[in-house]
Image (cartoon, grey):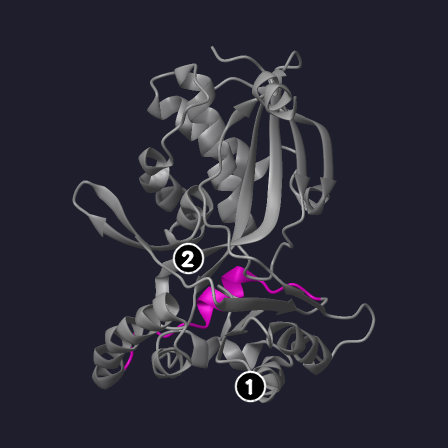
Amino acid sequence: MPLLPLHVRVPASTSNLGPGFDCVGLALALFLDVTLVGESATGASHFETRKGTALEWPADGGCLVNAFERAMRDAGQDPQPMVWRVVSEIPIGFGLGSTGAATAAGLLLGHAFAHGTSDVDPHLLITAGAEIEGHPDNSTASLLGGCTLAIEGQDGWHVLQHSISQDIGLAVAWPATPFDTRSSRGALPKSVPFKDAVDQPRRLAFLLAGLANADPNLLRLGATEHLHQPYRLPLIPGASQVFAAAATAGAWITTISGAGSGVVALASRDRIEHVASAMQGAYHTADPPATARVLDIVRDAPRVTTIDEESTADR
């Protein structure tokens, strides 16, 4: 077994980016820090400490512990009750991948613990993450970093990591009230017109080219979406105004983040702070106010470390 405690820092994510529905994920610099302290003496997994938005998690650890136990079983071992320390700055219920990040953290730590090494290849965990979440986009981005696309094959899920230009700035805004993901999923149609289904992959091709080259014209052509955004946008109070405000402030494209109610905008780096401010002001909420952040894209995969490794790196 590796030395305990084990630690991992996992990024948040936005997903879909318009036409990349349940396929495209993008890792963002809001973080979940999880420390696996050791085995529990109480017979049940529990938190030693939890801070930030982790205070809103279920007491049994929810998807973090479920993913940890899945990784243990996949390694041929019986899950053990563990003690956890968790700090999260990822808001819950705003389409920023809080569940995907917790799933990724649990899988990474479970794999490391079961195999007795902190050297974990996150590609081995893609299929488990997609199966736990029911879609691949958020957990995959949190596991690998950067911009990811995932597709299911007969032997599990396969991932492409797509380049995204350093010249793209990204802003996220979310209101004070979270959005129920189940309600958002329930708003989706069971079928769409044939012409919309044909157009969707065309748009995605242009979106990906625009991401790679920071080309606003390609991004605008690629941002049109038919499968989810037209049905979700009316359910998010103030979102249409946020889209309009972002465009006026210089955003190249604006999309719902995941299932919502967060909204993501892409723009040039010299305009992105202005875009974020405009998005925050457009939400119809005052007490407490909406939040807007300019976020870096996390381009590297998270790494499991032991406390000894972290201490050595600090010397």
State whether the magenta stretch is mostly helix, strand or loop: loop
User: How many discs appear?
Assistant: 2
1 or 2: mark nearer the eye:
1
Q: Is residue 240 left or right of residue 278?
A: left
Q: Pointers 1 and 2 in contact (CB under 8 A)?
A: no
**In this view, which residue lies farthest toward the left?**
154
- Splitting the image into 4 quarters, where does residue 36 fall? top right
SS assignment at label 1? helix
Q: Earlier in the sequence, mark 1 or mark 2?
A: 2
* Residue 7 colored in magenta in the image: no
Residue at image point 56% right, 82% down: 243
The three-letter amino acid code for the residue at tag 1 is: Ala
Q: Quadrant of the C terminus?
A: top right
Q: Is residue 286 left or right of residue 184?
A: right
- Splitting the image into 4 quarters, where does residue 249 fall? bottom right
Give the CA separation, mark 1 to mark 2: 22 Å
Magenta stretch in the rendered image: 177-192
Which of the numbered marks, if any, corresponds to residue 25? 2
The three-letter amino acid code for the residue at tag 2 is: Gly
